[in-house]
Amino acid sequence: MISQRTIAAALGLTQASVSNSLNGSGRTSVQMAETVIDYACTHGYTGPISAYGSRPGAKSSTPSRLPVQVAGGVVSRATFEWMIEALDWAGTDAFSGHGTRKAMA
């Protein structure tokens, strides 16, 4: 298990910035929070992680930005959503003619 101090040292941040990013509190940018959360999840951080900008008891109107656990490991939410869209396209006939030669009339 890694600590918040270890994450802070690896990313060149303060421990307070890492704590704020993991807890969804304080003045942290979305980009920094996602970077910290991605690093924490991929390196075995087991402490609590809250969604960016979340408050206890509040319902978010935006989808979660937390990383997603998939069979190959942990991926960002954006990558996961892209994978879902790619799989949806694969189920259609959009790719059926790819790589096949058609006779010219």
Image: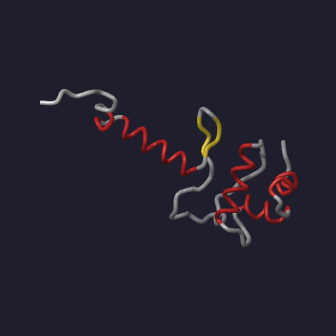
Question: Which sits in the foreground, 11 or 58?
Answer: 11
Question: Which sits in the foreground, 85 or 105?
Answer: 105
Whole-percent x and y of residue 63?
Answer: 52, 57
Question: Which sits in the foreground, 92 or 40?
Answer: 92
Whole-percent x and y of residue 95?
Answer: 33, 35
Q: Quadrant of residue 90?
A: top left
- 97 lies left or right of 7: left
Whole-percent x and y of residue 10?
Answer: 83, 53
Whole-percent x and y of residue 17?
Answer: 79, 65
- Please report the residue visible at 49 percent of the width from the left and 42 percent of the height from the top: 83
- Please report the residue visible at 69 percent of the width from the left and 61 percent of the height from the top: 33
Q: How many marks?
A: 0
Q: In this view, does 52 lie above or below 87?
A: below
Question: Which sits in the foreground, 23 or 81?
Answer: 81
Single out the residue that lies furthest toward the front: 104
Single out the residue that lies furthest toward the left: 105
Q: In this view, does 68 lie above or below 71?
A: below
- 104 lies left or right of 46: left
- 63 lies left or right of 8: left
Q: In which quarter of the image is residue 73?
A: top right
Single out the residue that lies furthest toward the bottom: 27
Check the image and tell me how it is coloured: secondary structure
- Please report the residue visible at 60 percent of the width from the left and 49 percent of the height from the top: 76
For the C terminus, the image quarter is: top left
For the N terminus, the image quarter is: top right
